[in-house]
Image: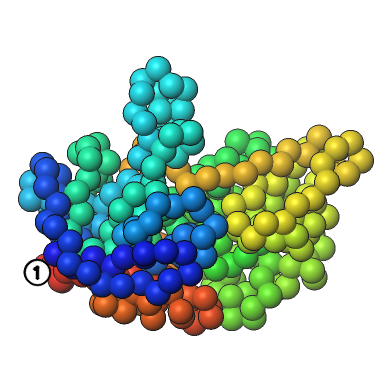
Amino acid sequence: MQAVVLRSPHARLEIEERPEPTGDNVIDVLGCGVCHSDLHVVDGDYPSPMPLVLGHEVTGLHRDLGPVMVYAPWGCRAADRVMCGSGQEMLCANSKEIGLFQDGGYAQRFAVKDRSYLHVLDGLDPVRSAPLACGGLTAYRAVKHTLGLVRSIARPRVAVLGAGGLGQFAIQYLRLLTDAEVVVGDVAESKQLTAVALGAFHAEAPDSLDLPCDVVLDFVGAQSTLETAVRLVKRQGLIVVVGLFGGRVPFGLGAVPHEVRLMSSIWGSNAELGELLDLARKNPLRYNVEELPLAEANQAHDRLRRGDVDGRFVLVPTKHPSR
């Protein structure tokens, strides 16, 4: 079968022939989303083993289950370990996420080690839904962290910093799951307009935002956006950082508003992926997908670096007859 392989950090991706995967849960890959985390692997930001087949937003065709989505953060699955025992494999210290720390879905076929990692799509389009496996799920968990606080406040206000793929998902989740007034900060005017179209009350450049907020979701994580988050958040508010751009802010009494909580959020649990797919079936989510053949993985990476994408890229190794 064909697979797209990264042989070393900073190298170009190469297509090569690999042995057919074996086992009871081999899927024909129908779609594999291209994520910013893939670029971090190429840039050597993670201790990823090489050579590596990238790709962690994977959907495919299972011989018994039909179209499925793969849950990507595979933990050690030891029942006596706190994270895996509680179903939070993405927090397992021994987790090996597909496409990041073991071979993933930039390939024609893929072997899933356990059927419990497969979610039946049940009517969701396998190519269009692929970005939900990471981008959609990561934003979903980040929003879930805020629900207790947001739902306890009369007329809550939530700021979303960064209206790219994840931020656009978050705006929709907040509108579906809460009655919060959502304000958005993004430097790109086109993304500001998209945010308002998705239900945001207001959108402008992050530095221009001046409305006090009960919650701030930072999908950028740069120095400037974290500083904006601290400036906007109210006392007893919550800041959730998801973005990987390396920002840091001082924390301590007087450094942030009183009794503010700062936390990070990472990916999502296997159960939360099931919740998200249920939500997407009942409430079709709005986002653009551009399909590209597997052979154009390098072009997809190049365009993603340039910001030349309106939504999400999905590599399509296999055409499903129903499409």
Q: Which residue lies at the image location 80% right of the left edge and 70% below the top edge?
A: 208
Q: Quadrant of the N terminus?
A: bottom left
Q: Secondary structure at mark 1?
A: loop
Colour basis = rainbow
Q: Which residue lies at the image location 71% right of the left edge and 73% below the top edge?
A: 204
Instruction: Describe residue 30's horizontal placement relative to residue 226 as left or right.
Output: left
Residue 305 position, x and y percent, is 52, 76
Q: Is residue 28 above or below residue 214?
A: below
Instruction: Describe residue 272's horizontal placement relative to residue 117 as left or right.
Output: right
Return the residue nearer the eye: 188 or 26: 26
Q: Which residue lies at the image location 34% right of the left edge and 59% below the top edge?
A: 51
Q: Circle 1 sits on which residue?
A: 321
Residue 242 position, x and y percent, is 59, 52
- Give, as a three-letter code, the residue at label 1: Pro
Residue 276 position, x and y percent, is 38, 48
Q: Is residue 117 above or below residue 304?
A: above
Instruction: Describe residue 165's horizontal placement relative to residue 189 as left or right.
Output: left
Return the residue nearer the eye: 270 or 200: 270
Q: Quadrant of residue 323?
A: bottom left
Q: Which residue lies at the image location 31% right of the left edge and 65% below the top edge?
A: 5
Residue 321 position, x and y percent, is 9, 69
Return the residue nearer the eye: 167 or 3: 3
